Image (cartoon, rainbow, N blue to C red):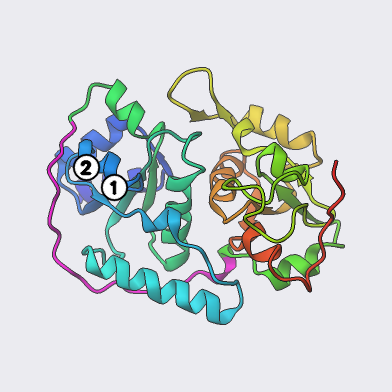
Amino acid sequence: MVRQQKHESVNTKLLISPQSLTSLLAEKLSHIIIDTRIPEDYAISHIPQSINIRDFFTYLLENSYPAGLKKLQEDFAEIMSRVGISGAEWLIVYEDTLNKGYGQSCRAAFLLKYLGCAQVSILHGGYRAWQTAGLPTTDEVPLPESSIFRLHPNADMMVTAAEMLQAIDNPAIIKLDVRDRNEWLGLSSSPYTVDFCPRKGRIPNAVWIEWHRMMTSESEISMFRSKTEILEICQSVGITEDSIVYVYCFKGSRAANTLIALQVAGISARNYFGSWNEWSRDFSLPVDSRVM
């Protein structure tokens, strides 16, 4: 019973340190570690027992209407079943470092929560923090047995294009753009290439905080800032602890990273997961295309 209570206590933490993850491995509790990096980096070295699922970062939502969300759910249920994830385990996700991979581990955590996984943590500081702590790595690849993933989608986590459209003229909902500067200014349509999407600009009435600002970047190990620091950054665009915030980026990844920061600060927020990749391609949706 004591072990069960300790397990539940640790599981409430969305951010987990390398030292805490080491303790988890020693306790041999039911867990799965997910590496979201490119397969080439994973093949060189990774955290022992971790499995590589790059799809958490590369998957592009077709659209945020019911058919698109249903396809996302079915696609990931198949992926997770194939690698032996049922959804009942404690899932720990990591990337190289939080400010370099466009929020990929946070995107993974967001998707896992959305799909119905109750126990999800992000390795704070990423793989670099693990290595800096002198913890063991390996190039051995585990061979998990297949499982059946149980879908329990949490629709409240996902802002759809229709909901974002309704929110544009609602001052009670803050539309937060967290893309890189050139995307916000309307000089580029994506972090990939300038003309990757058909339109450049912003969702009308959005405010901007570049996602990097929510993390420290003084060292190679990026970490989320303190609650006080995050609140101060948010207040510069009118966001307080009482605000309702819809966050977007290009494909919901940097937005997922920002959601973690907002959660640290106690701010209620949802992810417009389709983000600019969806919005810019639907010409019925309005765009503020002024070059700022």
Pointer 1: what residue?
39
Q: Please report contact status of discs 2 and 1: CB closer than 8 Å, yes or no.
A: yes
Name the foreground residue: 241 vs 124: 124
Left or right, 261 with reference to 170 = left
Query: How many numbered discs sit on the rendered protein?
Result: 2
Q: Which residues are magenta?
A: 137-156
- Magenta stretch encompasses residue 26: no
Q: Quadrant of residue 271?
A: bottom right
Pointer 2: what residue?
43
Vertical relation: 212 (above or below) 112: above
Vertical relation: 32 (above or below) 213: below
Q: Residue at x 40, y 47 (%)?
A: 12
Query: What's the CA distance linking mark 2 and mark 1?
Result: 6 Å
Do we see residue 57 in this rendering?
yes
Q: Position of residue 61 (x, y in %)?
A: 53, 67
Residue count near mark 2 (Cα–Cα under 10 Å), binned few <14, some 14–19, many ≥20: some
Name the chief secondary structure element in magenta: loop
Q: Position of residue 252 (x, y in %)?
A: 57, 55
Q: Position of residue 88 (x, y in %)?
A: 29, 64
Name the foreground residue: 181 vs 175: 181
Residue count near mark 1 (Cα–Cα under 10 Å), binned few <14, some 14–19, many ≥20: few
Q: Quadrant of residue 288?
A: bottom right
